[in-house]
Image (cartoon, rainbow, N blue to C red):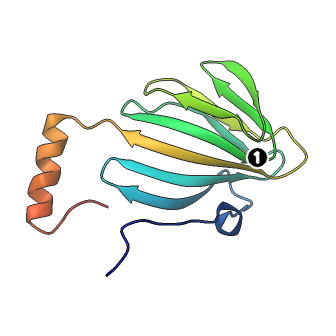
């Protein structure tokens, strides 16, 4: 039997690339997913918002600044930041070390989306 659960070692899964954002998917189950965000010193993810996603950011290592509705919030290991849908946010590794963040995302699902997903699933074309 294949296990339905997943055990992940964040330190082994983390990546830090010379890109604006290093995003390592961890899991996706229906409207719930998570990924690791790896920032090298000086890297920035510009401010943006998601109209249909609530996000929780857990700082696992390093430190930096998370911008929330234009306000800087310093975030180091142990910080947990909840960002409701529609709130502008961005990231800036202002520290001297790698900054590792786990993002957990809940996509708000509306009746029309749920019906479309169900129909696609029945047809064997469910979105991932």
Q: Is residue 118 above or below residue 63?
A: below
Give neighbour class at mark 1: few <14, some 14-19, many 20+ (Cα, 10 Å): many
Q: Residue at x 56, y 45 (%)?
A: 103
Q: Which residue is mark 1?
A: 43
Percent coordinates x, y for residue 5 in the rendering: 42, 65
Residue at position x 60%, y 54% from top?
36
73 relative position to 109: left or right: right
Q: Is residue 34 left or right of residue 66?
A: left
x, y (%) of residue 27? 45, 60
Q: The C terminus is located in which quarter?
A: bottom left
SS class, disc 1: loop
Q: Quadrant of residue 19?
A: bottom right
Q: Is residue 122 left or right of residue 75?
A: left
Which residue corresponds to the image point at 69% horizontal and 64% vertical from the top-left? 15
Total number of numbered discs in the rendering:
1
Is 44 positioned to the left or the right of 120 in the image?
Answer: right
Above or below 54: residue 12? below
Viewer-nearest residue: 48 or 55: 55
**Image x and y of residue 63, in percent:** 81, 40
């Amino acid at each position: 039997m294949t296990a339905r659960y997943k055990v992940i070692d964040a330190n082994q899964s983390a990546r830090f690339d010379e890109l604006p954002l290093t995003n390592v998917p961890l899991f996706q189950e229906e409207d719930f997913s998570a990924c690791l965000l790896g920032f090298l010193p000086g890297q920035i993810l510009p401010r943006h918002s998601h109209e249909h996603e609530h996000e929780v950011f857990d700082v696992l290592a390093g430190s930096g600044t998370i911008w929330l509705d234009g306000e800087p919030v310093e975030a180091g290991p142990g910080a947990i930041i909840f960002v409701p849908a529609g709130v502008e946010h961005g990231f800036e590794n202002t520290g001297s070390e790698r900054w590792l963040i786990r993002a957990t995302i809940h996509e708000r699902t509306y009746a029309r989306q749920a019906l479309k997903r169900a129909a696609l699933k029945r047809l064997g074309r469910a979105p991932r």
